[in-house]
Amino acid sequence: MPTRFARARRLRRLHRSLLAIFVAPSALALAWLGAALALGALPAGGTRAVAAGGVEIFVVSKGYHASFVVPVAAQGIDWRAEFPADHFKADIGGLSHVMFGWGDRDFYMNTRTLADFRLGTGVRAMLSLGDAVAHVTYIMRPETGEQVRRLALAREQYHALAIFLRASFADGAEARPLLHPGMGYGPFDAFYVGTGRYSLIMTCNEWVGRGLRTAGLPTGWWTPLSGSLLWHLPRG
């Protein structure tokens, strides 16, 4: 029979194990959030003035996920050459802008809204266990607001951003983006094989932040949260 001392020692070990299971992840989560808020508040990029009459682009946030919106055609770049009409179920001919997003393949393709969230898919994404996917949606020009910020880019800034966006798509035959056939939220969007890998460091929002830094636009040092992207962007 185990002695009272032995039982007490086992209980202490169990207690320490439970603390490790529940407290350590919470501490790591708080540390991650603190770093995200602190580094997101520190300005990076934006050393070059935004052109008053340049190419109009937008950063659009859903509160948890941010994307770029750019003109279908501007400054010699026509995105229909990379993402043609036959990739989409509906006619994209009358739509003026393209929305670009990036993220973990399984999470992004299966989580249209927060109501679709599944814990297992989210954990796999955070642990960088899946492949990346890029998302294209043809839309009309968005209206600016609390979650939609407008920027005007000089020609060289827009070209730098366009190179960044295109590099987020893996190439297939004839150096064209690799389509996930039939996959999309609706008739005007499509998913493509992405480059890179999603993680707690490289989130969909940090992807937008890197694009902004590439173009010399204002953002934070590290922007894994969509809110920290908007802190540095002009309103209206």
Image (cartoon, rainbow, N blue to C red):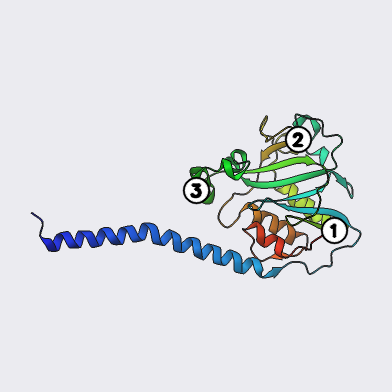
- The residue depicted at 65 percent of the width and 53 percent of the height is 63
Query: Residue 153, labelled with which disc?
Result: 1
User: In the rendered view of the protein, which quadrant contains the N terminus?
Assistant: bottom left
| Between discs 2 and 3, the one toward the N terminus | 3
Camera-side residue: 98 or 127? 98
Q: Number of marks in the image?
A: 3
Residue 210: name its quadrant: bottom right
Asked if the residue under mark 3 is in contact with the one under mark 2, i.e. CB atoms within 8 Å, the reply is no
Camera-side residue: 127 or 121? 121
Kindly identify the amino acid type of the residue bearing the numbered disc 1. Leu
- The residue depicted at 50 percent of the width and 64 percent of the height is 30
147 to 79, vertically: above or below: below
Q: CA distance from mark 1 to mark 3?
A: 37 Å
User: In the rendered view of the protein, which quadrant contains the C terminus?
Assistant: bottom right
Asked if the residue under mark 2 is in contact with the one under mark 1, i.e. CB atoms within 8 Å, the reply is no
Q: CA distance from mark 2 to mark 3?
A: 29 Å
Asked if the residue under mark 3 is in contact with the one under mark 1, i.e. CB atoms within 8 Å, the reply is no
Lateral position of residue 152 relative to residue 181, left or right: right
Labels 1, 2: front one: 2
Q: Which residue is mark 3?
A: 123
Kindly identify the amino acid type of the residue bearing the numbered disc 3. Val
Q: Which residue is mark 2?
A: 188
Kindly identify the amino acid type of the residue bearing the numbered disc 2. Phe
Residue 216: name its quadrant: bottom right
SS type, badge 1: strand
| Between discs 1 and 3, the one toward the N terminus | 3
SS type, badge 3: helix
Q: CA distance from mark 1 to mark 2?
A: 26 Å
